[in-house]
Amino acid sequence: MLLKREEVNPNRPDNKDQTPLQCAAWNGHEGVAKILLERNEVNTARPDIYGRTPLHPAARNGHESIVKMLLERDEVNPDKADNDGRTPLSGAAFNGHEGVGKILLARDDVNPDKADNDGRTPLYSASWNGHEGVAKVLLERGEVSPDKPDKDGRTPLQCASANGHEGVVKMLLERSEINPDRPDDKGQTPLTGAAFHRHEGVVKVLLQRDEVNPDKPDNDGRTPLSGATFNGHERVVKILLQRDDVDPDKPDNDGRTPLYAAAWNGHEGVANMLLERDEVNPDKPDDKGQAPLSGAAFNGHDGAVKSLFARDEVNPDKADKDGRTPLTTAAFHGHVGVVKMLLERDEVNPHKPDNKD
């Protein structure tokens, strides 16, 4: 009815340069899109202020019929990037729209490995969100580099590993070009991400590869075990501790061991697993002279303190480089339970001053 009025402009954009056709494409209104496309005034390739043409939202939201209609128009560029460098294929891959991905990949003028401004390819996007169907379609293309990193050095495998997408991880590892131990710009490998985020299945899959170093530190000196202990992932810690090539007492660049990380965050179960290992020094200080007991006392973790007391090597009155003992720290932060436990120990001097007296 509106289009019958001469004063109605069917190509008139809103304040963000989005035309009626773009709105119809975004929401998948096939009938409306068809009516608009019959009008000569309608520009099917007009970008909005973000550089997105009607094909972008149609592909991103999986509206196959509208994608097909738009691709029939010669003026529509199926590989046009928006202001962020994202193509219609990138959008479809990010949201897992396999059907749209196949339609676009059938075009010779679509680059299946085209990266956006952050260096993220369609495969990267599909891997990030665990879209196995789209990832499989992309990996069938010879032009696609399955180990291509983004601007931060993160590969599709690292994204899939960090987000726990085991199916995509297995699919990527089938490719000989993939380096399963490749670090990003922060030195974090796929195993680091999987261990840090508690993805037990992915950890197991990666550890099956001989190339994977299970004790490889990142740029801060943190190993996969450090990440798992910091976040209290007991099952992942258990898997890593079963490896002979994992050092359970390896400190990071600040001198903090996995036990320190577990004690600091109050992960009693992880702390107990580490304390069962003879190689672990339960009283090993970091670069500031703070031992695991100091870390547990600082944050008021009664259970971790109790676990550490089970080891004879732990000095409950050990001062750090500023002369602060675990009791000083616990008292300062008002942790009554820890204070009581420390005061029960004969070795603890309740009147011991720090370096500032």
Image (cartoon, helix red, strand yellow):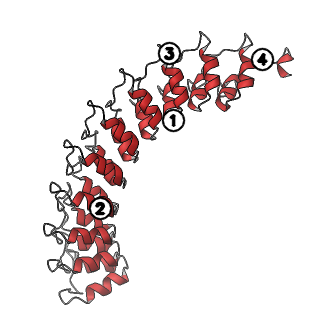
The tag on residue 250 is none
Residue at 55% x, 27% y: name it.
100
**Relative to 138, is 75 above or below?**
above
Q: CA distance from mark 3 to mark 4?
A: 32 Å
Which image quadrant is residue 12 in?
Answer: top right
Amino acid on which the number 1 mark rests in the picture: Gly
Earlier residue among tags 1 and 2: 1
In the picture provided, is 277 more to the left or to the right than 7?
left
Q: Which mark is nearer the camera, 4 or 1?
A: 1
Are dots 2 and 3 in contact, CB under 8 Å? no
**Residue 230: x percent and y percent?**
31, 61
Q: Secondary structure at mark 4?
A: loop
Quick one: 142 or 260, which is closer to the camera?
142
Q: Secondary structure at mark 2?
A: helix
Residue 53 at least partly seen? no
Q: CA distance from mark 2 to mark 3?
A: 48 Å
Q: Which residue is mark 4?
A: 9
Q: Quadrant of the N terminus?
A: top right
Amino acid on which the number 2 mark rests in the picture: Thr
Earlier residue among tags 1 and 3: 1
Earlier residue among tags 2 and 4: 4
Amino acid on which the number 3 mark rests in the picture: Arg
**Residue 268: x percent and y percent?**
32, 72
Q: Which residue is mark 2?
A: 229
Are dots 3 and 4 in contact, CB under 8 Å? no
Q: Secondary structure at mark 3?
A: loop
Earlier residue among tags 2 and 3: 3
Quick one: 348 or 261, which is closer to the camera?
261
Crowd band around label 4 with a 10 angstrom C-alpha radius: few (<14), some (14–19), many (20+) = few
Q: Which mark is nearer the camera, 3 or 4?
A: 3
The tag on residue 96 is 1
Q: CA distance from mark 1 to mark 2?
A: 33 Å
